[in-house]
Amino acid sequence: MKPAERALSNRKAFEVIQNQSNDSASRVNLFKVANRYYNMNLLNDYKETVNAVLKKSVESRDSISLSKAYDYLGDYYQKESFPDSAFLFYNKSEKIYSLKNDFVKLAQVRLNKASLQFSAGDYYGSEKNVFNALNSTKHIKNNDITYDSYNLLGVLYNEQGDYDKALEFHEKAVTSIDDNYIPVEFQSKATSLNNIGVVYLNKQDYLNAEKSFKEGLRQRLVNKQKPIVYAMLLDNLGYAKFKMKDTSGLPKLFYKSLKIRDSLQLTAGIIASKLHLSEYYIANNDKVKGLQYLKEVLATAKKSGNARNVLVALKQLSVLEPQKASVYSKSYIRINDSLQKAERKMGDKFTRIEYETDQVINENQALSMQNRTLFYVFSILCLIGLFFYSYKSQQIKHRELIFRQQQQVANEDIYNLMIQQQNQIEGIRINEKKRVAQELHDGVLSRMFGLRMSLDSINQINDDDASKKRTVYLDELKNIEQDIREISHDLSKEKSELINNFVTILDKLLEDQKRNFETCLTVAIDRAIKWENIENAKKINIYRIIQEALQNSNKYAKAQKIDIVLKKQKNTLVLTIIDDGIGFNIRQSKKGIGLQNIQYRIKECNGKFEINSDTNGTVITIIFPIKPNKHNLKNYDV
């Protein structure tokens, strides 16, 4: 069956199951549909199906299906490269598996969390979750999880430079392989032999590395069942030979590996192969070819957002091209700092997710205990009498209502409060406009219409001069009547939308500026900007930047005129603020708190800015991307 036919068949199955009654069989079948979508790499359909079964699980209070749905959503976000969201859902799933004592699934979800933490550079958190996974299954024979745990620990310790410990766990991984639990076609042994060889490479024990890679290549059908592992073994074997100055099979091994990785579109693998080819050709005095591969690595790494490989390429380029060494070094330092900050931020986020999830569980348990206590009190009061029952019942309802109100208030943020306030103001304005419109229409227009009818009847007198004058008056009255009608209609018309109230809030800031300062303020805002599609944090930062710029102009610039232009250009918002004040020295003012605040907010929005200032005035131009990037690190300029 063709992929399109399989997808259509799966969609029909989903629609049939979705309309069935919400029982355990229908939820199991929905998971089967989700699995098919995942295997077809139709991730949006996969997510839709998982959300459907999640909703059914909540409605039926099926905690087993609920934990499985959370687990599936974690897989979705991991596949889509949203590690924080994946970690959140894995964490939710883990809590339910723990309560249900489902140790196998508990261990697997902890391994998933550990993999996310390892990829984000949170090695301590990753190590902790791997050992938690092993503890979950210490009384259960499950070599699948045991192998994955030992393998991840070996990779983790290798990354930290603890090579002896890395070898210890990789050897344990090989020992734990059992064909009854891990299918042979997974090529687990070949994978571990490759990992062991990599550790020996890092230890500069190239002879043992070569032996390990060769043994991995001797594994039956590894080239067909696991071409990814096969390509790694070829490339690493070539590199071990190169380090031992053994030229047999070189550079053929590198090119063979690169061809496989190209065919599979393995970006990280392609980068690794080209790095080895670059090093090989440079060592063989072919600097031109080596430099060519190195620049290809840099371009590919930038495009894929692989910051670590960008750093490797920059480091080697600074040696090969000393005339550009300072430029490469600056880029290296900038990217390395950004990478460390991103890793720390992601590690903190993982910790915060675990803490907040535990906190919610504790609060739910406390609330559950409180509800049980209230129920017991309620039951006792029922026995005492109807009066006390009624009184206590009302008291409990009132207490619950206050609790819900306090919880709702606590969850509101500053921006939503501003929106709510502006909605109230706008509602009052609309009601007032309607009232004025009604007064104009029912009062003034009626009287003027009567006056026009009277003049029209008088106009029957056959006096030419009088008739001409009356005609002029009548025409004028008709014009006035039309003007008032148009005003009435305009006042009655409500705005179709408030653009998420952001423009209205911004208008109030600008009105305050005009009212409180003599400076001539000119504003041009592109009203076609879809503010509802722009995140609140970015809108608040734009508001604060304009507020800060106006304050600086009022306080220091002595400006007579300020121009503010906010418009959309392709996938960006461009904010330009111009004043004709006395200007300032940009270099001396960089340490000022006002300019630092603006720079910080622009950085928060991933924006770019430019300031030009002289005695004729100041021009600030800021560009914000409308759509946030998936990755924090990409598009590095050298």
Image (cartoon, rainbow, N blue to C red):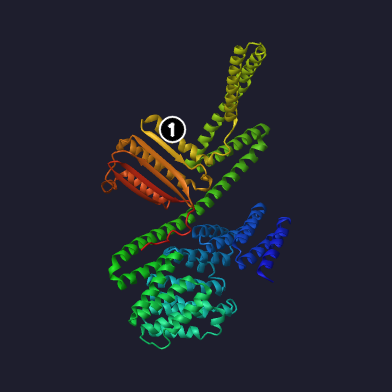
Residue 551 sits above or below residue 314 on the image: above
The answer to which quarter of the image holds residue 243 is bottom left
For the C terminus, which image quadrant?
Answer: bottom left
| Residue 65 percent coordinates (x, y) | 64, 59
Residue 432 sits above or below residue 628 on the image: above
Is residue 65 toward the left or the right of residue 309 in the image? Answer: right
Amino acid type assigned to the residue bearing label 1 in the image: Glu
Residue 502 visible to an observer of this rendering: yes
Dot 1 alpha-carbon crowd within 10 angstroms: few under 14, some 14 to 19, many 20 or more: few
Is residue 278 toward the left or the right of residue 177 in the image? Answer: left
Comparing 314 with 466, the one in front is 466
Is residue 198 toward the left or the right of residue 325 in the image? Answer: right
Comparing 259 with 6, the one in front is 259
| Residue 626 percent coordinates (x, y) | 48, 51
Is residue 580 toward the left or the right of residue 35 in the image? Answer: left
For the N terminus, which image quadrant?
Answer: bottom right
Residue 176 sits above or below residue 387 on the image: below
| Residue 235 percent coordinates (x, y) | 45, 80
The answer to which quarter of the image holds residue 335 is bottom left
| Residue 561 percent coordinates (x, y) | 36, 36
Residue 162 visible to an observer of this rendering: no
The outermost residue toward the bottom is 248
Please name the residue shown 58% across and 38% down the image. 496
Query: Mark 1 highlights which residue?
Result: 511
